[in-house]
Amino acid sequence: MSSGCAEMAGGITCGSLLQKLQLVWDEVGESDEDRDKVLYQLDQECLDVYKRKVDQATNSRDLLIQALDDSKIELARLLSALGEKAVARTPEKTSGTIKQQLAAIAPTLEQLNKKKNERKREFVSVQSQIDQICGEIAGTTEVGEQVATPQVNEDDLTLERLEDFRSQLQELEKEKSNRLEKVLEYVSMVHDLCTVLGMDFLSTVTEVHPSLDDSIADNCKSISDETLSKLDKTVATLHEDKKLRLSKLQELVGQLYDLWDLMDAPTQERSMFDHVTCNRSASVDEVTAPGALALDLIEQAETEVQRLDQLKYSKMKEIAFKKQTELEDIYAGAHTVIDTAAAHMKLLALIEAGNIEPTELIADMEGQISKAKEEALSRKDILDKVEKWMSACEEESWLEDYNRDDNRYNSSRGAHLNLKRAEKARILVSKIPALVETLVAKTRAWEESRGLSFMYDGVPLLAMLDEYVMLREEREEDKKRMKEQKRYVEQKLNTDHEGPFGSRVSPNRPATAKKIPGPKSNGTSMNGTPPSRRLSISGQQNGRSGGKDSKRDSATKAASSPGNGASAAAAKEDASSHISGTDLAPTTP
């Protein structure tokens, strides 16, 4: 035992102490039995001390082994969480003391823990942004509001997982950008619509969401589903209001134009509502001017329509008679006879009775005017040819007077002009038969298609043409008879003897051929038809058709003019004998 004892501090050892104990026992006289007991006790106590030390050393070794195992497990977990297959500096030695192995693995663990903390912070940052955008889209998080720190799965901190989160964040940021762009587009549309409708933009847009105010930055505006839905509904509602207001305004503008046209409003009065009427035919998308569809503008148009509507009753008589005058002018231009006095009386009775709405009355008169215009249009071709016929008859009458003029070949002033006119007149007169034939054919076709007689100033046109043709034939017969008489006179003169002084006795001037009874200004024609009916109904038309009277009167004279005015021989004949017919042709209708 003494040999196994180590030296104590200060040079005292277990052996020296045992020797000192032996000396004490010798002095005391302890028995061997007691000595053996003390020595046995000392041995047991030493064993207990060694045993405790061994147990303590064993426990310390077990703890170190556990720490080493935990470090290896932590190393494996970190490698798995970080997605690292191996670490370059991972210790491969499994020999040596436990403390040596722990010392070798500690730097790697420290490095991986540091990398783990950095990776975790990246995950927290990305996931926080994802939660922020998702909350803004869902409407559970306001823009700029801090979200709670997300729970990070520390067992999966791989770069692949981090890239997945970053891709998700990128998609969400793109969606956020698209939503923000859509929100700004909606806000712009709301602004434009409010401007056109004259509405308060700020109150309208902030009613959807307070962040949509212009004073708030764009990146702070709400992009939630609810905000987008409300904006879409707001735009749809405003657009529908715009359509309804435009429709209402255009309806009012149409009424304004009808009333203006009805009352013949001056341009200056109409120009005061140019800001209202400028969108009369515009589409919804074309109306962009500020306040173009404001309620006060529509109310202004309504007020003006009401004012004019009340005013039209006081001006109804003036307007109605103006329309009646327009109707009578159309009939007069078409040479159609109407009872103007009866029409005026009937119109006056309707207005004074008040049994008909003014607009209905004007609409009825507009219908009559439209019908009269259609009737006039159907008669235009025939009337144009009647006009040519009258002009030709007028030239025929002038040519007759010209042929009777004994001085027509004198070198007087203007004689050459009359000569040119006479040549043209003879050509024109030669076309009268063909013109009359065409006019008769067209008139008959018109009458057959409508089952009516074509009246010209109250007289059947065909009757007028038939009378003209008959009188023209009579005139031709008289002309032939006069030529025969002239020939007879000339032959008789040739057989006469000369007088005592060698000169030929002048024959008696033959009597002029009888005149065909024609219409006179204050008499009647051969068939008893008053000229005022056959030639003109100017008395019935209040003077509207009086412009044609001179041509009709000329037609009367032209009926007795030579048939072939273009013949130079006829002109020479007239110059030598001055014997020509003086019969009157029928006055043109």
Image (cartoon, helix red, strand yellow):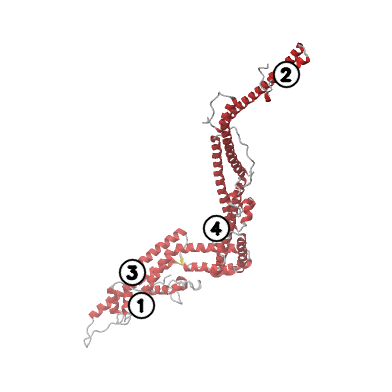
The foreground one among 231 and 311 is 231
Q: Amino acid at mark 4?
A: Thr
Q: In x, y percent, where is residue 443?
A: 42, 63
Q: In x, y percent, where is residue 59?
A: 66, 23
Q: Amino acid at mark 3?
A: Ser
Name the residue that disc number 1 marks: 401
Name the residue that disc number 4 marks: 288
Q: CA distance from mark 1 to mark 3?
A: 17 Å
Q: CA distance from mark 3 to mark 4?
A: 69 Å
Q: Amino acid at mark 1?
A: Asp
Q: Residues within 10 Å of mark 4 (few under 14, many from 20)?
A: some
Q: CA distance from mark 2 to mark 4?
A: 123 Å
- For mark 2, give the secondary structure: helix
Name the residue that disc number 2 marks: 20
- For mark 3, give the secondary structure: helix
- For mark 4, give the secondary structure: loop
